[in-house]
Image (cartoon, grey):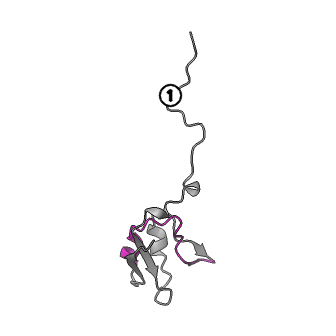
Amino acid sequence: MPQMSRGGVIKNPGSSKETPTGGWRTLRPVWDKEKCVQCMQCWLYCPDSSIPLKEGKRIETDFEFCKGCGICAKVCPAKCITMGVEEK
């Protein structure tokens, strides 16, 4: 009887770091760093980890992975993040 391989086995799982998803975006977060109070709410709630930190402070959004969901703008108490139309 021939041997069959097991079904549903993923031999080489992928990684989200290897799959940029920013091309899905229709809205783009616009960050006003002058108004930002560095509360880190955007960083905390971002589902894609698209808000990097440098020396404990938020820096520009990583648009390679940001899908434009708008959560960062919604949770920002300083209203320093607005959502604009993505221009391709």
Question: Residue 70: x percent and y percent?
Answer: 38, 71
Q: Nearer the viewer, residue 43 or 88?
A: 88
Q: Residue furthest left?
A: 74
Residue at left offset 42%, top offset 73%: 86
Counting other residues with Cα less than 10 Å from the Cα at mark 1, is it few (<14), some (14-19), or many (20 or more)? few
Please state the extent of the stretch shown in magenta in the rendering.
Answer: 55-76
Q: Is residue 61 magenta?
A: yes
Q: Tag 1, which secondary structure?
A: loop
In the orientation shown, which residue stands out farthest toward the bottom? 34
- Whether residue 24 is situated above or below residue 78 in the rendered picture: above
- Say which residue appears at 54% left-offset and 33% top-offset: 9
Q: Which residue is at the far front?
A: 88
Q: Position of residue 52 (x, y in %)?
A: 56, 71
Q: Position of residue 45 (x, y in %)?
A: 44, 68
Which residue sits furthest right?
55
From the viewer's perspective, is residue 4 above or below residue 53? Answer: above
Mark 1: which amino acid?
Gly
Instruction: Look at mark 1 in the image and give the residue it sits on.
Output: 7
Residue at (53, 66) in percent of width and height? 64
Is 75 magenta? The answer is yes
Please indicate whether residue 47 sits to the left or right of residue 13 in the image: left
Q: As rendered, which of 24 and 17 lies closer to the eye?
A: 24
Quarter where residue 41 is shown: bottom left
Specify the principal SS of the magenta part. loop
Q: Quadrant of the C terminus?
A: bottom left
Closer to the camera in the image, 35 or 41: 35
Query: Residue 69's image quarter?
Result: bottom left
Q: Is residue 61 above or below residue 4?
A: below
Q: Would residue 54 appear left or right of 74 to someone viewing this image?
A: right
Residue 59: x %, y % from top left: 56, 78
Q: Quadrant of the N terminus?
A: top right
Residue at image point 43% right, 74% down: 87
